[in-house]
Amino acid sequence: MAFQRRRHHERMVTAARMSGMTAISAAALFIFMVVAFLTVLAPPLVDHPSFPNQPEHSRRARRSSILLENPMEVKGKVSGGEIFRVPNGGDMQGSDIWESKGSRYFYGCSNASKEFEKADAIIYPDRYLMISTSGGLNQQRTGITDAVVAARILNATLVVPTLDQMSFWKDASNFTEVFDVEWFISSLSKDVKIVKELPSKGGKVIATPYRMRVPRKCTPRCYQNRVFPALLKKHVVQLTKFDYRLSNKLENDLQKLRCRVNYHALRFTDPIRKMGETLIKRMKSKSKHFIALHLRFEPDMLAFSGCYYGGGDKERMELGTIRKRWKNLHESNPDKERRQGRCPLTPEEVGLMLRALGFGNDVHIYVASGEVYGGEETLAPLKALFPNFHSKETLANKEELSPFMPFSSRMAALDYIVCDESDVFVTNNNGNMAKMLAGRRRYFGHKRTIRPNAKKLYSLCQNRTSLTWDVFASKIRTFQKGFMGEPNEIRPGRGEFHENPSTCICETKSEAGSSAQVQQRVELKDGRDNLSKSDALSGYDEQDWGDWDYGETVPVGKALPNRTAVDYDHFLKNEDTDLEEFSD
Ligand SMILES: *[C@@H]1O[C@H](CO)[C@@H](O)[C@H](O)[C@H]1NC(C)=O
Ligand SMILES: *[C@@H]1O[C@H](CO)[C@@H](O)[C@H](O)[C@H]1NC(C)=O
Ligand SMILES: *[C@@H]1O[C@H](CO)[C@@H](O)[C@H](O)[C@H]1NC(C)=O
Ligand SMILES: *[C@@H]1O[C@H](CO)[C@@H](O)[C@H](O)[C@H]1NC(C)=O
Ligand SMILES: *[C@@H]1O[C@H](CO)[C@@H](O)[C@H](O)[C@H]1NC(C)=O
Ligand SMILES: *[C@@H]1O[C@H](CO)[C@@H](O)[C@H](O)[C@H]1NC(C)=O
């Protein structure tokens, strides 16, 4: 593994260096990619494009690797003499592939109602709430958002949250190094009083924090029953491992407060935002639209989730070895996991899905990913499908990235910014970042967000060898209905609030709109009234979303620390397992 990781790292460094090449050699590379691409697509689809630095024998030596038993690689089983061949161009005639037509009738609305009292009126002077978050950047983001609401529920002053520096990703950054703390405090001043640290009297803090933990999805009543008595007695309460500790359902004003925190008050520091904007500018200079893909395919994640991708004994052994790091993991049933849509799609499957949805091979794609199991070899089919393949390492040089490089949260923040600004955001997983960005993009006007219907796509990819491209693509389009980020795709109240902030999404009430507008609104209304009958919606509801909450992207090549099962809390199917209780 160590060898593979190092090799992968070297490649990424090479890739980064290549971004600095002259235009001429870049053009040469482009031609090479096109040729490689055409070679790959020559019927029947047989092999990966060969990379110049990968000798023939090494490719053969890796015969048992993850991809070679993948259906895309299987030769000559196509029935009826037709061939599974991905056409070059896109299929976007008259379609609204880059944005949802219905989206313009919706907007984010998170202002407080008149009844919502100002912070000054409800805060008690001797109540302080401290929280320490848990997990990667986006898991911490839910914690910070919910902490503000918890302070409001308790009429307490919030101390700026402490970030998790011990988690899986071991990032020593504190709050002020990741988020704009002055903006955070000032923009929420009407809602909740926030201070940078506990006040002190004569050089001593007013009280020692009383540490406790609330259950997951704790309701306001639960806060009042469990935390409030401690707060009265001790004046300072610190809630630990604070993530997903607040109920999904809350009264409207509290939900809207959640949105004000998450979508307005919580922004990254200036250096992070500036670098993020630079990356976006570079993507936009390449083409009018771009796709951002958040790809999770780390060996650890695959091992932990017990997934198997057809790489034979080699893969079983590698992932099995990693899997042994965790005690108490039940025997996995990889086939079942994938059948049930609990495994991330492979890079190749994501690429095929996007091409089937109508994105052509000329589309530019930004890929946010950590270490990919199998490295370049696993990525090759995706790069063949989308030769205009970018990442922060190819868009920016080492010097530009160096202030962020050692900090996984800051690197993840850059990806967050670019993914957020993309025209189309797509994931191969359902982790925290995927959920968080899906919710955010709904709030800011239903920007196109594609979530793979993993269960259906897996089965379809299994059958790929007996299908023509046209049939395959048409099935993908059918299966993806309801997973494209259209308005009203998920029923209000379904899923995590941060993923589906329905209370904060309003529909325009234009009375005398054009006829098209009226018709659109009627359609939407029908859709809503007939929710349970709609295929698209029931597709979403039926989906047995696995919990892929595991962390965020990590800089490629960074040595990963040892883990404990605790880091994978959210991975477990049952959120309220005892595991959490013995985790610290
Ligand atoms: C929300 O409040 C802001 C600032 O007070 C105001 O500019 C905006 O128009 C309000 N939005 C709505 C929908 O009322
Ligand atoms: C917080 O303040 C409001 C308004 O004064 C009050 O209704 C509520 O009971 C208070 N809650 C707690 C936990 O003190
Ligand atoms: C955060 O880290 C910076 C740099 O290490 C340090 O200057 C600052 O005091 C820290 N802030 C807090 C609140 O710990
Ligand atoms: C794949 O093939 C199997 C067996 O022929 C069939 O039961 C299943 O429905 C097919 N899946 C899809 C998504 O077409
Ligand atoms: C719901 O769907 C049925 C048929 O599927 C249709 O007859 C009915 O009018 C729809 N309901 C509404 C409120 O549009
Ligand atoms: C990680 O685990 C290995 C083997 O169990 C051990 O040798 C190594 O010291 C550990 N590293 C850390 C940082 O704990």
Image: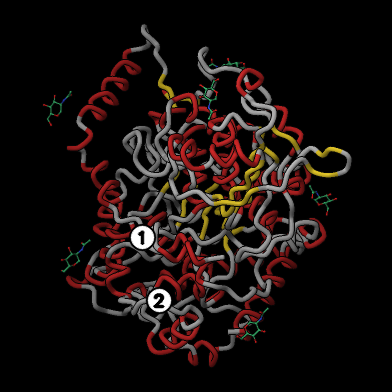
Please give the name of the residue rendered at 71% of the width and 43% of the height, measured from the top-left corner.
179
Please give the name of the residue rendered at 63% of the width and 55% of the height, measured from the top-left corner.
412
Percent x, y of residue 563: 57, 73
Percent x, y of residue 553: 59, 61
Side (left or right) of 343 relative to 265: left
Q: In which quadrant of this rendering is ligand 4 seen?
A: bottom left
| Residue 77 against residue 103 in the figure, above or below | below
Extreme residue in the top direction: 512
| Residue to which mark 1 is pinned | 574
Query: Which three-letter amino acid code belongs to the residue tagged 1?
Result: Asn
Q: How many C-alpha atoms fall within 10 Å of the one at disc 1: few (<14), some, or many (≥20)?
A: few
Label 2 to label 1, Cα distance in Å? Answer: 13 Å
Q: How many C-alpha atoms fall within 10 Å of the one at disc 2: few (<14), some, or many (≥20)?
A: some
Which of these two is toward me, 272 or 457? 272
Of the 4 image quadrants, the one containing the C terminus is bottom right
Secondary structure of residue under mark 2:
loop
